[in-house]
Structure formats: structure tokens, C-alpha cells
Amino acid sequence: MEQIRYELYKKIANRNPAEKSMLATVIEGPHIGEKIYFSGETAVCALPEDGFLAKKGKVLLQAAQNGRVEADGEQIFCEQIGNPPVMVICGGGHVSVPIIQLAKMTGFQVIVLEDRRQFADNAQKAGADHVICDAFADGMAQIKGTLDTYVVIVTRGHRYDTICLKAAMQKPHAYIGMMGSRRRTELVKQQLAEDGIKQDLLDQIHTPIGLPIGAQTPEEIAVSVLAEIIEEKHKHTGQAATTLFDEQILSYIIEEKYAGIKKVLSTIVSKKGSAPREIGTKMLVLDNGKTIGTIGGGYAENEIIKASLSMMQEKMIQEKERCTLMRVDMTGREAEDAGMVCGGTIEVYLEMLS
């Protein structure tokens, strides 16, 4: 069973970023602990291979966002697995610098395309993770794109806008926005329409880019751009649309050098009130008390760590005893004494790994 579990998490680590991925876990019921992982609409790994979840593929695939699904009286947590958000900024001019800085502050990996060395250097100094100093067409050819890629086009001319926009629309993406006057952006769209790009795709472009807050300075424009992108990220749901598997957490689960270390993976599967972290947030607790990731700190996290260490100290016999569903109430007196001001409750699924 442990080998199948290892293979399942390995497939998650090596998933195709351009395809939708979903992990389903029975968190309550007779089959607690069972898992199945989908890449696209294909079940690529089930734990166990012929178990309860292996027969529920169609029901599970209907889950469009992170949350619970009930099947035959059992509670199943479905999580859409996303990729770290990447912002591709085409152009390294004076507006790009504050966009880079705000994007880094809000959790994006930032790639900048710029064909002028001086401006490419400025983007690097501003904190971009990767700068491609090359012709825009050649730079865009190096961008693979994922369903979590956000493209911001702020070049110095509509000729370059057209090159970047046409290339971006042919790659997986979550968002494309283009800066410029209405006349300039309409010229670009017209050129792309003449090149055969369908109108429904052109209508999805955010232009003029940014929320209409009357922004004038480069810094204000950056705020409007990031605000629009953040709104777009969360527009369709009040909770995190996808789960992000921290690379360090995955490495502790699948790398052989950590195989002898007991560990418990905790995942927030539901929340009420103003709990600090979203559904799908994960934390790994090692048998020496070390943690990787966080579910929000404070009282709730301390309770989860204590429960995780207790699980690892017990002698587990049956597979179903390797996991449990735990409720943490942050509205009570103990939470108040610990300084928690969130006033919410969370349910956390604990899964022991070795």
C-alpha cells in the first residue's frame, strides 16, 4: 500500500502543468484514507487500485472546485491541483518595475521579456525571477504556459503588443491583459482578427489593462493591474480555486532520503468563519516536530502539530488508523487565550506517511 501511495504522490509531483489535475480522498466513512488521482479525465492512480473511489470516477470529476462530495454516505474531499502562479510580463519599461515588485509581493513567479539590455537589467534589479533578453517572438517561444499563467503586455509599441498577444493566446493561460489606449488596443485586436484569431478569444483579453481606479503613475497602474489579476484569480469562487502542493512538502513525501522519517500531512478540508487559511492548505509534520508549510499558525496549528505527533507515536495497525478528520474551533476560550482573533472553525484531514 505504501508503494502505491508513493507512486500517487510522485505522479502529482510530475504532473503535466498544462492539464487539469484532481485528487480525491475519502475523509469520513468506512473507506477513509482511500485516494484517487486524475490527470485530465483519466484516473492515473488509485489507492487501493480496485477500491471504493476507483468506481466513482464520473461522480468525482463533476467537482469543479475544492470541497466535499458525498457518495454512498461517505465524505470525499476533492481538490483541484494547480501550479504556482506565474506572471509573464512582456516589456521592461517604467511601468513594469512596480508590476514586478507587486507581483512578487503577492506570490507570483515573475518572468520578464525585454529585447533591450538596459531595461532587461532593470527588470532583474526589480526582482524578476527570470529575464529573457531577446526578440519578443523568440522570448514568447520559450514560454510554455499553464492554466495558472498570467500574461501582462506592456511593451513600447503595438507591433510588439501584437507579437506577444498572438503568441500568448496560443498557449494555456489564466489571464491576458494589455496596456494601451483604446485606439492602440483596438488596432492590435483588428490585426489579430485579420490573422484569423476568433472574436470570442479576442473578447477575453483584458484591455485596457487594470481596474478603472483612475491610475496615473506607474505605481498606481501597477496596483490597478494586480488588483484586476487578483480579482480574476478569485472571481469564480470565494475560496481557493486550486490546491498548491508545496515543492518541499512533495520532496519530503517522495524522495528516498526521507523514506525512513515518519510524517503526517495535514490538509484543511473545510472552514467556517474567518479562519486564516483557505481550503486545500497543507502542512507536513515530521516525527521530530519540524514542520514544512503552515496552516495559519497560532492555536490551530499548534493543535494539529500535537495531534500529528501523537499519531506518529502510536503503533498503527490498520490502514484506516493512519488517517483521521480533526475539527479545530477557534472561537472558544482556549483559542482566545492563545491570541486567536479569527473566530472560525476548520476541519483538517491528517494522513500519516512513512
Image (cartoon, rainbow, N blue to C red):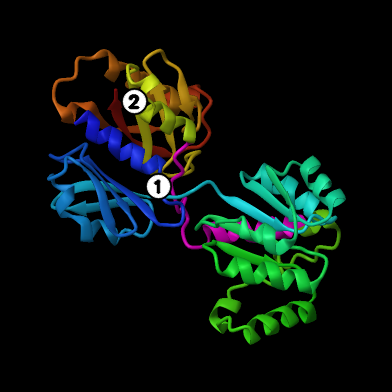
Range of the magenta residues?
A: 222-246
Quarter of image, res 229: bottom right
Mark 2: which secondary structure? strand
Task: Report the residue marked by disc 2.
Answer: 264
Q: Position of residue 103 (x, y in %)?
A: 68, 48
The three-letter amino acid code for the residue at tag 2 is Val
Nearer the observer, 106 or 188:
188
Specify which label sits upstream in the sequence, 1 or 2. 1
Q: With respect to residue 79, does 171 lie above or below?
A: below
Task: Report the residue marked by disc 1.
Answer: 15
Circle 1: is it few (<14), some (14-19), or many (20+) Cα within 10 Å? some
Q: Can residue 263 be seen by looking at this rendering?
A: yes
Q: Is residue 34 left or right of residue 208?
A: left
**Structural distance between the alpha carbons of marks 1 and 2:** 22 Å
Q: Position of residue 195 (x, y in %)?
A: 63, 83
Mark 1: which secondary structure? loop
The three-letter amino acid code for the residue at tag 1 is Arg
Residue 311 drawn in magenta: no
